[in-house]
Image (cartoon, helix red, strand yellow):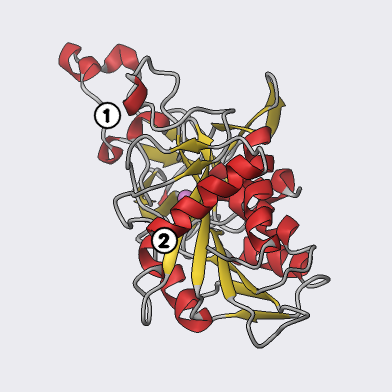
Amino acid sequence: MLLRELTRLFGPSGEEGEVRRFVVEHAAPYADKIDVDNMGSVIAWKYAKENKENAKTVMIAAHMDEVGFIVQYVRDDGLIRYMTVGGIDPAVCVSKRVLVGQNRVPGVIGCKAVHLQERDERSRALKHSQLYIDIGAKSKEDALSKIAVGDYVIFDSDYVEFGRGLVKSRALDDRVGCAVLLELLRHDYPCNVAFAFDVQEEVGLRGALATAFRVRPDCALVLEGTTANDTTGARVHEEICTVGQGPTISFMDRASIANPALFERMRALAKEKSIPWQLKRGSAGGNDAGSIQRTAAGCATVAISVPCRYIHSPASVCALSDVENQYNLVKAFLDEGGNY
Ligand code: CO
């Protein structure tokens, strides 16, 4: 799989070009047709080779974008105020390395040192408005010779495999989905498959609205990275899901409710094929299923997600076996023609 390569790419919501070029290049040898829509999402089509009249059209969706920042303005002293792109906890930002703009100017997110904070400041969580990006500039002019207002910023962090089959990286949400889609594209299926690599999921499920409108699928599977809260001593139902126990199948989240028949089919398929899986024990966040299921005349959807610890941070963690089993489960569904 191409997960390592995909996590190296620069792709905050709205600036997915680098990921898009990679996806188009790697999909081209296998796709029957590739569309890039007006928002920048990629749809790679694989058509059923036989029984074309009765073949269903299944959409398999993942999002190319990741959370990040955008340069809001530059202070006279050369420090950068930023806005967040997608949901990022200020607590994961302090002292983190970042890359600013397409030239990837290195920087660090700074704040007042602990020694200088008042007693009550130390016990309160920092806000984004108290943080800034330091690119080592001497002045506003110096900073603006390297970067511009409106430049996107991403965390600077490496892909590292560690522990027993775990990986630590930025942007696992949702480059895991992109990696699985590119792998699934290598095969033929008895249904028409539209592999949608969507833009702007992290800022409100925007790109998928347009791709689903173009595809008009009979059903859609959304491949995601989702929050695993399995390390904080939370009660079982608050863990949401557990890393290493297989991809999650969601009954609902904050943006959509799974189609009951499709949900049931995915569970049965996992059992039939002995693919590890888990129910998502809670409904934190939403994903592109929320947009896809209400586009045009509506569509049956379900989300299949890889559990990720420390999601939306420079170092999220997932199990490679969960990515593998997300692939196995979705492939089994496509091999059967997308029936449910
Ligand atoms: Co996501």
Under circle 1, the secondary element is loop
Residue 2: assigned label: none
Q: Nearer the viewer, residue 130 or 182?
A: 182
Q: Is residue 32 above or below residue 311?
A: below
Tag 2 residue: 289
Q: Is residue 165 above or below residue 326?
A: above
Under circle 2, the secondary element is helix
Residue 277 horizontal/vertical position (percent): 55, 37
Direction bottom: furthest residue: 53
Residue contact between numbered discs 2 and 1, judged by CB atoms under 8 Å = no
Q: Quadrant of residue 167?
A: top right
Amino acid at circle 2: Ala
Q: Residues within 10 Å of mark 2 (few under 14, many from 20)?
A: many
On the picture, is 303 further left or further right than 185?
A: left
Q: Is residue 11 above or below residue 322?
A: below
Residue drawn at x 50%, y 83% is 214
Q: Nearer the viewer, residue 116 or 10?
A: 10
Tell me which label, 2 or 1, sits earlier in the chain.
Answer: 1
Q: Residues within 10 Å of mark 1 (few under 14, many from 20)?
A: some
Q: Quadrant of residue 120?
A: top left
Direction right: furthest residue: 29
Amino acid at circle 1: Leu
Q: Is residue 38 above or below residue 23?
A: below
Residue 321 horizontal/vertical position (percent): 67, 34
- C-alpha distance separating marks 2 and 1: 33 Å
Residue 219 horizontal/vertical position (percent): 49, 69
Residue drawn at x 55%, y 55% is 146
Tag 1 residue: 126
Q: Quadrant of residue 258?
A: bottom left
Residue drawn at x 78%, y 72% is 28
In this orientation, does residue 226 appear? yes
Residue drawn at x 68%, y 51% is 6
